[in-house]
Image: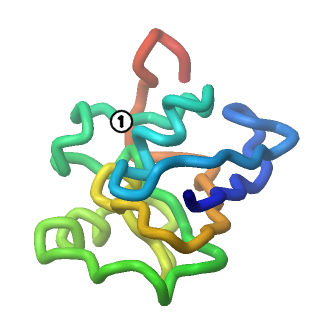
Amino acid sequence: MPQIIVLPHHQLCPEGTVIDAPAGVSLCQALLDHGVDIEHACEMSCACTTCHVVVREGFETLSEADELEEDLLDKAWGLQPHSRLSCQLLLGQDDLTIEIPRYTINQTREGGGH
């Protein structure tokens, strides 16, 4: 079972967190299941970029993003070479360290926050 280290995020997890999640589940779902309320405006259907994350460690162990994810990532705020959409990133057996960018292109958060 991979361990996911989530670096501190000013709003979602100010202290950062470490979670264990089963292989085969999306990173987005694993975060949500463990109380990290990452945005996912398209309900994880690969139609937006609000669940964008930067993989700081373990990127080389991931399968490559498909063309649709790559196209959407081009629109993500704060795009970096190791950016992925967490809804499309299926966890394998390897540990990851991720950073959730401070902002998204979304103007409002689900649940009424900003």
Q: Quadrant of residue 68?
A: bottom left
Asked whether 52 or 105 is in front, the reply is 52
Q: Quadrant of residue 3?
A: bottom right
Other-residue count near label 1 (Cα within 10 Å), few / some / many at <14 / 14–19 / ≥20: many
Can residue 32 be seen here? The reply is yes
> Position of 77 compared to 95: left or right?
left
Q: Residue furthest right?
A: 15
Give the amino acid type for the residue marked by disc 1 in the picture: His
Name the residue rendered at 51%, 81% in the picture.
59
> Position of 38 compared to 76: left or right?
right
Name the residue rendered at 87%, 41% in the picture.
15
Q: Quadrant of residue 42?
A: top left
> Position of 96 compared to 78: left or right?
right
Name the residue rendered at 54%, 23% in the picture.
114
Pinpoint residue 88: horizontal percent, then vertical percent.
28, 58
Q: Residue furthest bottom?
A: 60
Pinpoint residue 32: horizontal percent, then vertical percent.
50, 31
> Position of 86 compared to 95: left or right?
left
Q: What is the total number of numbered labels drawn onto the structure image?
A: 1
Check the picture and name the quadrant holding the N terminus.
Answer: bottom right
Asked whether 7 or 60 is in front, the reply is 60
Q: Residue furthest top?
A: 112
Above or below, comparing residue 103 to residue 64 in the picture: above
Pinpoint residue 28: horizontal percent, then vertical percent.
42, 44
SS at mark 1 in the image: loop
Q: How is the image coloured?
A: rainbow
Name the residue rendered at 54%, 47% in the picture.
21
The residue identified by callout 1 is 40
Can residue 81 be seen here? The reply is no
Pinpoint residue 17: horizontal percent, then vertical percent.
77, 44
